[in-house]
Image (cartoon, rainbow, N blue to C red):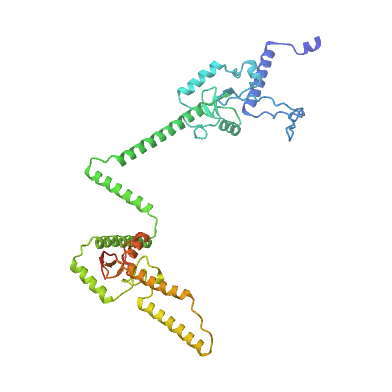
Amino acid sequence: MERKASLFPVTRHNKAASITALTAVALQDHWTRALGFGTAPAPSFSVSTRKKTVQPVVDTGRVKSKPSQSTSLEKEYVLDKKPPPLTLAQRFGLVQGPPKHLSEGEWSNVKALSNARDDSKEPCVICKEDFGLQEQVLLSCSHVFHRACLQAFERYTGRKTCPMCRREQYQTRVIHEGAKQHRIKCTTVIQAAWRGYVVRCWYKKLRKTVPPKDPKLRKKFYADKLEAITDRIVKSCDFDVNLFLNEIDNSLQRSRDIFKHFDELHRFMSDADWDIIQLKAAERDNKDCPICLTSLCNTSENTPRELTSPCKGDHKEKIMHQKSASAHKISEQTKFGLPQLVPPQGGKNRNHESKSTEQQMKKSVKCRKTVLLSCTHVFHETCLLTLEELALGDIRNKCPVCRAVYQKRIISL
């Protein structure tokens, strides 16, 4: 050992040379690492011992699920976990070492400095887009970027330097100032749009209800009102034109019939008019009532049909024919030597009954009252009254023969 020490004596010149060599090596190592010329780190062949959790397809209820710790989206946190190791130059003090982690107070000051410049309101410097709801990072140099944009910039440059001030070894912290500004901006836009919509609706309603004072505008206001009303009427009338015109024609015809009916009922008719109508009825020479089909005279209401149909002369002829037939029968019986039959007492009764019926006919024969209508037709008064009671609607005051509206007058035939 003493011999080796004697071979390499320690002198002041040798000590300075060794220090210079160490300094050069330290600086060379520092710049190699800073510029990225160093060797890549050796790959780790350590096998991961993390156990893979297998979840059952069907929940059996045996495994109790742990309550998930939900982290708030507005929570801020630092992305840098550990500072990089010091190089030899940084240990010797030749190069300034990386700064220590900033405290919460220091991050608050950095954030206040960034907010004072309104960096969160401006678009990202890298992508030139608003921050919106995307993740936003704040650097220790008080500059703000998208997290994805900053990571892409670091991969592209191969170093960790600020894109704005070129500061190295910065610290990053996730903040949400851009998301807050984006929500405030969206809320402002929505409220402005809603208030504008409300004001426009109110103004439109006001313009529709209150006419303007200007004469030209007032004229246009009422023209628009009339046009809107006509459009609504046209839209509501969804019908066939031909059918509509037919309905109009039918209603006009009904109206004319009603007025004609009214005029016929309330038209004054003098005696001369009735005389002319009676002459026309006589010229027609109708002796039967069109309703009951019986004679207009020599009929009675209470007489049966057997009595009203034959006349007095016909009945006498029938009786005489019966008597002659009975006499001829008696003569034949005497001719052949047959005994004469005594007529039953019922024959006398029949003759007596025929005489009584003739007397009843003489007593009950009374002329019915006849009615002359303004249309020159003649009816029994009772028949016409019965028809008027049974008739419905428009047929009530119309003639049964010609369907004309009439006025009536009682006459004697």
- What residue lies at 37% left-to-right and 65% top-to-bottom? 302
**Relative to residue 80, is residue 364 depicted above or below?**
below
Q: Is 384 on the left-hand or right-hand side of 86?
A: left
Quadrant of image for the C terminus: bottom left
Residue at 61%, 33% (x, y): give it: 155
Q: Position of residue 28 (x, y in %)?
A: 65, 24
Q: Residue 113 location, x and y as percent?
A: 48, 21
- Judged left or right of residue 263, residue 173 is right
Which residue is nearer to you in this view: 3 or 236? 236
Q: Is residue 128 left or right of residue 372?
A: right
Which x, y percent locates residue 330? Answer: 48, 85
The residue lying toward the viewer, choosing from 348 and 209, is 348
Q: Nearer the viewer, residue 63 or 229?
A: 229
Which residue is depicted at the point 22% across and 44% down? 215
Q: Does residue 128 lie above or below 269 as drawn?
A: above
Quarter of the image with the N terminus in it: top right
Splitting the image into 4 quarters, where does residue 363 fall? bottom left
Q: Is residue 312 at least partly visible in the picture?
A: yes
Q: Is residue 170 visible?
A: no
Q: Quadrant of residue 353?
A: bottom left
- Quarter residue 149 falls in: top right
Nearer to the camera, 163 or 67: 67
> Extreme bottom residue here?
335
In the image, taking residue 3 as reference, residue 263 lies left or right, namely left
Q: Say if 159 sits above or below 381 in the image.
A: above
Please provide percent x and percent y for residue 278.
Answer: 24, 71
